[in-house]
Amino acid sequence: MAEDPQYMTLTGHLRELRQRLIRALVSIAIAFVFTYHWSDRLYGILVAPLLPYLPEEQRFMVFTTVTEPFFTYLKVGLVGAVVVALPYILYQVWAFVAPALYEQEKRVFLPVVALSFFLFVAGILFAYFVVFPPAFRYLMGFSGEMLRPYVSMSLYLGLAIRLLFAFGLAFQLPLLVVVLVRSGMVSVETLRGWWKYALVLSLVAGALLTPPDPFSQLLMAMPLIALYWLGVILAMLSHRKGG
């Protein structure tokens, strides 16, 4: 007889958690088979926003060690596999948590998980199409007769992945604000009064998560402020609708 999820022992919870983790890892491994096969093309997509701003005779990436291309493509394949498998991973999170939730909580939790994924993807797309071109145009503007850009493929990958994931996480802010208000942990009026702190924290986040130049930091901080206010507006509308 199967254990009732509401009365499952600690051992049962750990066994269930292990099964969910194994399934998530297997999904990443299966996705990796395909993403690694296409890793050179995926890397080409990541590099595309940078190439137009390199000198015409130097529109290529360089590697400084023999193993750098192999490990770079390996990382591209792994990151791509995680992104591809992310919906299934989130489903495993839902399947693990759902039995412990009440029906009303279930109706809220699943849409929140789904919306979180779409906001993450929206943040990545925003960074790639909106932030990358002007940021790279500004950064490559320092090149000249005395400065020639030879961009390492692995270092560029680290920068690109960090920015993409930073914006993916930043786009969770409206959802976080709504959840905080709906759970009663904070009020809309309090959030309105916190806008100065939100401004400072956005600037700090921009400084920590982007390259060390004011332009890139503003490209991060400005959307964060906009997302914060979007979250406040959505929380206000949600609060009124929910009474």
Image (cartoon, rainbow, N blue to C red):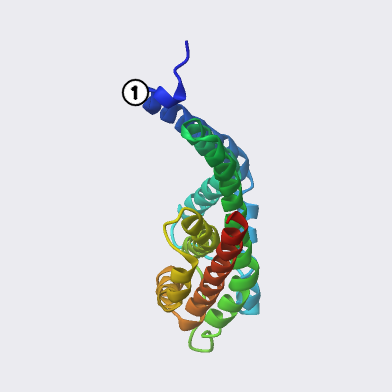
Residue 153 visible within the image: no
Give residue 223's position: percent from left, percent from top: 55, 72
Residue 66 quadrant: bottom left
Q: Residue placed farthest to the left in the image?
A: 10
Q: Nearer the viewer, residue 154 or 222?
A: 222
Please name the residue shown 34% across and 23% down the image.
11
Rendered position, 202 above or below 176: below
Q: Residue placed farthest to the front in the image?
A: 243
* Helix, strand or loop under label 1: helix
Q: Residue placed farthest to the bottom in the image?
A: 145
| Left or right, residue 65 beside residue 82 | left
Q: Amino acid at mark 1?
A: Thr
**Quarter of the image that includes the C terminus:** bottom right
| Left or right, residue 165 beside residue 55 | left
Please name the residue shown 48% across and 33% down the image.
96
Give residue 132's position: percent from left, percent from top: 59, 71
The total number of labels drawn is: 1
Please name the residue shown 57% across and 49% down the image.
112
Rendered position, 199 above or below 232: below
Q: Nearer the viewer, residue 28 or 39?
A: 28
Q: Callout 1 environment at 10 Å: few (<14), some (14 to 19), or many (20+)?
A: few
Q: Nearer the viewer, residue 177 or 127?
A: 177
Please name the residue shown 54% across and 45% down the image.
82
- Which residue is denoted by mark 1 in the rendering? 11
Rendered position, 74 above or below 158: above
